[in-house]
Image: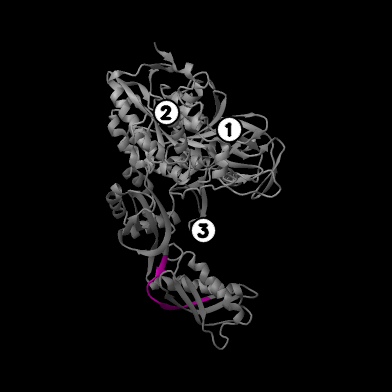
Amino acid sequence: MAQSEVSSRCGVADGHAKAHGGTGPRCIALIGPYLSGKTSLLEAILARTGAIPRAGSVTAKTSVGDGSPEAREHGMSVSLNVADTTFLDDSFTFLDCPGSVEFQHEGCAALTVCDAAVVVCEADARRVPALQTIMKQLEDRGIPHFLFLNKIDETTVPLRDLIPMLQPASTRPLVLRQIPIWENGAVNGFVDLASERAFVYRVDAPSEIVELPASLSEREQQARFQMLEQLADHDDELMEQLLSDVPTPRDRVFTDLTQEFRDGVICPVFLGSAKDQHGIFRLLKALRHEVPGVERTAQRLGVEDATSAACVFKTLHTQHGGKLSVARVLKGEFADGTVVTGPDGSDRIAGVFSIRGEEAAKRGPAAAGDTVAFGRLESVQTGQTISTDRIAGAQVFSPVAPEAVFAVGLGLKDRKDEVKLTAALAKLQEEDPSLVVESNGDTHQMLLLGQGEMHLRVTLERLQRKYGIAVERQQRQIPYKETIRVATQVRGRHKKQSGGHGQFGDVVLEISPLPRGAGFAFNEKITGGVVPRQFIPSVEIGVKDYLQHGPLGFPVVDVAVTLLDGSYHSVDSSDMAFRQAARLGMDEGLPKCTPVLLEPVMEVNIAVPNEATARVNGIISQRRGQILGFDSREGWAGWDVVQAQMPASEMEGLIVDLRSATSGVGTYTARFDHMAELTGRLADQVLAHQRNVAA
């Protein structure tokens, strides 16, 4: 007779009763590649634990997560979702991290405070590179993690091929905890290898325990033995039992699974379907019994000896509640009115709130393990650790925001919004540290930089919705410059008489090119006082005035100007007259020096899976890039780093091509390297555009 899975919740037969997890509320990250089903899994967990009456849907725009207008408009997670629930009297906070590579930085700071992570993925070989980037982050940071193989009912990959296909994404052994039960070509249940029980899925209901199908008995024994072999790699006594053919007690199996998971030497794999709420209860049982508590997380982060510590992993600016700092309490207690100290000063907590999706509700004091939001901590930034001590305590590791790889220019539709725009962008940057705002001194253009086109699109939508500021997106302007190829001498004379004191300045200038990158040099060889000493600085100022806008329309660099001779008038000469004389001389002389256009060239380091290296080399060549070489990416098996130089004008949309060629995982860093001459058709196009702008 079938037995409801719920009826065995508190029984000892599953082996978990003796291996209960850590004390206090646990914090679990849901992380995985784009469209793997993380938000659907969060909905299924909340529904299964009774936190919500029924699971919402991302496509129907009814999910607790992805509750912001931007997330619902685009049908994807664009920010971190936080939700609390309880399971069998244990408290959990789930952090649903965006899967899109453009928003994954949202989860980086959040992972810091988690006790464990559930990596959600599909049985799709094309997703393995994206899965690898996630698994490596967890491994490098010592965060225990499960793998939840979602959409198992849709998979067509045979089980014998499943783990070998996914294993390259993880340096830890993937330990299969379940095998599927197939019926009529579809998965309708699973066998738990640790407890040796079979379960059949039920629609909108918990799975039911059934007799292990005879057809699966041999396969179950093989899979279980393989699981035990993997555990025995870290347990000599278990290895002896296997070699001696001694049956392994279930309690021993669960103890080993728990210990090796917590030690981070294995990655257990569970099966299920978030959309249909299949496999959720088994996953929750594993979270309850095997995930360590906040004490171990505090130890991992080096604050186990602190009297109090809370790590802020997200900042929100709400319309009515002001600034909220979402934090995990690692040690001590934090209450409304508590004075806390961070690296930048002290603040008083103006309310403690619980968070679920877009909603914040006031609650009582927060103790170790709780994930809450603190009100009005104006001096506290994302990634900082606060304490109740007068002196700021140790700061836990917080990952640096990734470098920007995409940029747009910002133009205000209404100039009176300029001050409002600056303040609003500062708040958006506080919420999202991966955003960068720059004002280019050469092009006088305000730039917004981020992780991709969608990232910046969502940011501008938030800017409009939250702050009522509309901006025009502009193409990024390239800071071209110009220089000269030959030297010349020229006289510049400024003479003006209009009653009273006139104006008189007279200079002879030598203009000559300098080596690339030398900048600007001014010298003087005046003898006999033909130009009084007090006027020489004004000559230099006049020269610099002109160099800001050369004959081609761009700033002039790599030029030396020497003041050779001149004359003055005892009454009419002045600083302004000599400044103007220098400008006139430069205006006449520089066009004779064969001016040439210069374009900025960037040093680019592109990180890609090595199977895509050849495609990336082609992308570099198509963008007038010069490949300097490539090497293995340190610490990344199967990855290369390609070094190249590429004109800044060719960087537009580079990240789009890289992600297209690498299943979304390629990335790059870029630094200015040098200025290079630009001639021919491309130079003509740049100059024609500049003339149109000037007109």
| Circle 3 residues within 10 Å: few <14, some 14–19, many ≥20 | few
Label count reads 3
Q: Of circles 2 and 1, which is in front?
A: 2
Which label belongs to residue 23?
1
Question: Mark 2: which amino acid?
Answer: Pro
Q: Image point 55% across, 26% down: which residue? A: 85
User: Closest to the observer: 362 or 240?
Assistant: 240
Q: Specify whether 632 is left or right of 553.
A: left
Question: Mark 1: which amino acid?
Answer: Thr
Which label belongs to residue 441?
3
Residue 546's x, y, as percent? 50, 68
Which label belongs to residue 249?
2
Task: Locate residue 321: give its quadrant.
Answer: top right
Question: Mark 3: which amino acid?
Answer: Gly
Is residue 35 visible from the viewing direction of this image? no
Quadrant in which the C terminus appears: bottom left
Q: Of circles 3 and 2, which is in front?
A: 2
Q: Specify whether 19 is left or right of 203.
A: right
Spatial CA span between label 1 and label 3: 55 Å
Residue 185's x, y, as percent? 27, 21
Q: Indicate the secondary structure of the residue bearing disc 2.
A: loop
Magenta-tinted stretch: 482-493
